[in-house]
Amino acid sequence: MAHKPCIVIIGAGYGGIVTALRLQKELMDNEAEVILVNKHDYHYITTHLHMPAAGTDDVQNARVNITSLIDTQKIRFLKAQVTKIVPEKKRVELEDGHLAYDYAVVALGGEPETFGIPGLKEHAFFIRSINSVQLIREHIEYQFARYKQEPHRHDYVTFVVGGAGFTGIEFLGELADRIPKLCASFGVDAQHVRVINVEASGSALPGFDPGLVEYGMDVLRRKGVTFRFGVPVKQCNADHIVLANDEVIPCSTVIWTGGVRGNRLVEDMGFDSIRARVKVDEFLRVPAYPEMTVIGDSSIVFSEDGKPLPPTAQLAIAQADALAVNLVAQLRGQPLRTFQYKSKGTVASLGKGEAIGIVAKYKVKGSVAAVLKKVIDLRYLYIIGGIPLVLRKGNFS
Ligand code: FAD
Ligand code: NAD
């Protein structure tokens, strides 16, 4: 009997799950065996994580069981922690066992970029997974409870967000919305609570439309956020941070949103990369190992003018779509198509009813942008799970 090629998809985030769904649709029976490996049995909707982190949405809305999304007759799902990928042997090492592949799709996502800043790994929180955001939510609530017991400890109710990229800004919007509710339930005077954003650049969202950024900062300032621009975080401790100008801010909570880098497992393979994001070719393949593709936050692709594209869910989905088409073509001996990307735009939420964005070159802000953001979120749920998932997980409030 002829050997059936085995495609192993490593990681079931945006890139991995969309690849699996596309292959499930396109491949005929017996064309290939497809195995999807992920360390959890659920897919998480990373683009929602700032909400459960702040406690403005239920964490359950950000997770979906993987086997409820895929056809398990066509895609084999394996819940396993990948420990190493060995491209020379076409092998994926797992915590307990290994997998051999003919084609590997590496979609392991990214990790927080801490730039080696002392204390961040030990003391800061990161918005990156279901577990990490549950920790943030519980930690914030605990700080309010502690402050009630020791009202002289203003550091308990000082919340610092490091970095004002899109993740930082979206989290600040949610946190600022949650603070009044926390104050009411813990009996804390809102005057004593501080939410401070520290950003190394001269403004929030460096490089984004200045008018929209100004609008966004005004919204957040009105909700009580204080911005510190042009001064990087230099050090993080359990009860204070130190800025580059040696200023000390006493605080028991630092949420680090200073950027992302590729996954460590991908970095360990030693490919040509920038901040652990592998430079892939025009077919999203690793140049030395054409049977291996890397997509999503662990890959780096460039725009036509040579600038690295920011790692986004939108990009990971576009890569997954293109890659699935090429994998099917490869199996059928057909020519491959080069990956081309056109961003649909960006919309960032600023908490309830407020957002800013650029969509198809149109600038949007306020409630119109907030509705657009909701539509984008619901569209993704529709792509991966159809109307039933939209109804189950869509937050319509
Ligand atoms: P991920 O979605 O992170 O998936 C990686 C998968 O690999 C996960 O399932 C993980 O569990 C699994 N995995 C990791 N390590 C292992 C291992 N060792 N073994 C097995 N499995 C493993 N982008 C947008 O375009 N629009 C937005 O509105 C937006 N909002 C965002 C909001 C927040 C709060 C954050 C943090 C990011 C946001 N992004 C947004 C960026 C977007 O979420 C990422 O670019 C996207 O998730 C990348 O997809 P990915 O498939 O590369 O990785
Ligand atoms: P980012 O790299 O976009 O932003 C990180 C910010 O941290 C930058 O502004 C940087 O100047 C700042 N910073 C770095 N070092 C610092 C220091 N020492 N002190 C203070 N500030 C420091 O990272 P992100 O916001 O996590 O976004 C990651 C990716 O996810 C991006 O591609 C982004 O576009 C995407 N994303 C998109 C959306 C959306 O479309 N709505 C939402 C969230 C994230």
Image: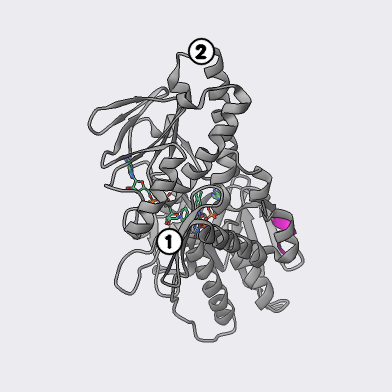
* Image colouring: one colour
Residue occupied by mark 1: 299
Q: Is residue 70 magenta?
A: yes
Q: In which quarter of the view is residue 279 placed?
A: bottom left
Q: Secondary structure at mark 1?
A: strand
- Asked if disc 1 is less than 8 Å from ligand 1, the answer is yes
Depth check, front residue: 301 or 92? 301
Dot 1, crowdedness within 10 Å: few (<14), some or many (≥20)? many
Q: Earlier in the sequence, mark 2 or mark 1?
A: 2
Q: Which label number is shown at residue 360?
A: none
Is residue 166 visible from the viewing direction of this image? yes
Range of magenta residues:
66-71
What residue is rendered at 68% in x and 75% in y?
25
Q: Position of residue 319 (x, y in %)?
A: 50, 69
Above or below residue 261? Residue 3 is below
Picture mark count: 2
Q: Residue at x 62, y 68 (%)?
A: 6
Tell me where residue 331 appears, x and y as whole percent: 59, 79
Q: Quadrant of residue 307?
A: bottom left
- Check if mark 2's residue and mark 1's residue have beta carbons within 8 Å: no
Horizontally, residue 93 falls left or right of residue 238, namely right
Looking at the rendered structure, the secondary structure element under dot 2 is: loop
Residue beneath label 2, please? 150
Q: Nearer the viewer, residue 99 or 199?
A: 199
In the rendered image, the vertical position of residue 118 relative to residue 375, given as above or below: above
Lateral position of residue 18 relative to residue 74, left or right: left
What amino acid is at disc 1?
A: Ser
Magenta region includes residue 191: no
